């Protein structure tokens, strides 16, 4: 019912920085762990850079056009407006899965182990996640979706999403499918949080990913990394970890949950350096307090 093909959606905003190592490791781990028949990379702006050059030959590229309605939406919250590209991807992923079926995952995913073979006989699969504060009843995250072509739940969800999209961060993408699943329980299978989101989006969950090593449950098939909460070094309300620290030296040398599981997907010629990693850590220990001080002084001055 569900074909062994994987879909990724990327590049719905201009690419101003090289393709990141995290994204390379997402795709490399998908290919090695799942042995997919094909990996479709749906994009508007094509990535660039050394990591992209390494992984591009293993992908089937498809150029897509952003959804016109979402592209023209006026956001009330400017903090959410910055993530318009993510909302564009929310619609694209369901459209692609309805047309072809397969498995969709966000690009901030690390794949750990193959899915059970009998899962591919199902119609539609989602995973529970820790609900956001306003979703007291529950939440099903759309960062990982498996679907047969034309699955009824995907059609119901996409139709409801088009009529209810309000520009909020996740009501249409996590709260809405939870409500629809309660109304249509026979149309999908819901896996526990441990399957795809065993380390959640809280400061503790992100620290467990990138700052310390914790054990994962045996039924953890992949990890979602919550990149929008930590990628920008200027954002530190969840963690001081950021994109600039996720380097080959970090992946090769750090004793953290992410590094320990991502290490096997590094190319053989990325040996890593314990000295460079230690230097990186030292520089960050000096730079982080200085950035915080500069921000406080900036707020006082304004």
Image (tube, grey):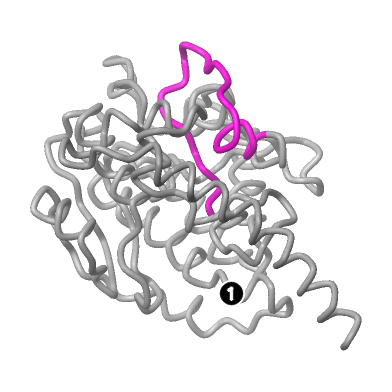
User: In this image, 127 relative to 111: left or right?
Assistant: right
Q: Nearer the viewer, residue 176 or 151?
A: 176
| Residue found 40% across the figure and 46% down from its top | 276
| Residue found 37% across the figure and 79% down from its top | 14
Dot 1, how many residues are within 10 Å of its Cα: few (below 14), some (14-19), or many (20+)? few
**Position of 192 relative to 30 (above/below):** above
**Position of 82 relative to 239 (above/below):** below
Q: Is residue 187 visible?
A: no
Give the quadrant of residue 92.
bottom left
Q: Position of residue 57 (x, y in %)?
A: 8, 53
The total of numbered circles placed on residues is: 1
Give the quadrant of residue 251.
top left
User: In this image, 61 relative to 255: left or right?
Assistant: left
Q: Assess whether residue 216 is covered by the magenta stretch.
A: yes
Q: Nearer the viewer, residue 60 or 47?
A: 47
Quadrant where the C terminus sits is: bottom right
Quadrant where the N terminus sits is: top left
| Residue found 34% across the figure and 58% down from its top | 9
Give the residue furthest to the bottom. Answer: 302
Helix, strand or loop for disc 1: loop
Q: Position of residue 68 (x, y in %)?
A: 42, 80
Give the quadrant of residue 46.
bottom left
| Residue found 31% across the figure and 68% down from its top | 18
Q: Is residue 194 visible?
A: yes
On the image, numbered disc 1 is attached to which residue?
82
Q: Position of residue 52 (x, y in %)?
A: 21, 59
State the extent of the magenta-drawn residues as a range. 205-227
């Amino acid at each position: 019912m569900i074909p062994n093909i994987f879909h990724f959606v990327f590049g719905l905003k201009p690419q101003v920085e090289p393709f990141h190592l995290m994204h390379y490791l997402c795709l490399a781990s998908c290919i090695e762990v799942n042995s997919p028949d094909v990996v479709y990379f749906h994009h508007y702006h094509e990535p660039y850079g050394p990591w992209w050059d390494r992984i591009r030959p293993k992908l089937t590229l498809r150029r897509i056009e952003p959804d016109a309605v979402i592209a023209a939406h006026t956001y009330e919250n400017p903090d959410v407006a910055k993530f318009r590209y993510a909302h564009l991807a929310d619609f694209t992923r369901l459209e692609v899965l309805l047309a072809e079926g397969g498995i969709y995952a966000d690009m901030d995913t690390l794949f750990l182990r193959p899915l059970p073979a009998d899962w591919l006989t199902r119609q539609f699969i989602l995973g529970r996640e820790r609900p956001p504060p306003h979703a007291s009843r529950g939440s099903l995250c759309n960062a990982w979706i498996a679907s047969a072509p034309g699955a009824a739940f995907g059609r119901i969800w996409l139709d409801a999403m088009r009529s209810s999209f309000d520009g909020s961060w996740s009501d249409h993408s996590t709260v809405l499918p939870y409500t629809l699943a309660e109304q249509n329980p026979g149309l999908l299978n819901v896996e526990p949080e441990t399957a795809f989101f065993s380390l959640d989006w809280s400061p503790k969950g992100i620290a467990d990913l990138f700052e310390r090593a914790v054990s994962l449950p045996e039924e953890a098939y992949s990890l979602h990394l919550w990149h929008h909460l930590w990628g920008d070094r200027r954002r530190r309300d969840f963690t001081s970890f950021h994109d600039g620290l996720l380097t080959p030296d970090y992946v090769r040398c750090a004793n953290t949950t992410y590094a320990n599981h991502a290490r096997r997907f590094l190319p053989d010629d990325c040996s890593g350096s314990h000295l460079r990693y230690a230097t990186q850590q030292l520089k960050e220990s000096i730079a982080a307090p200085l950035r915080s001080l500069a921000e406080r002084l900036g707020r006082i001055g304004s």
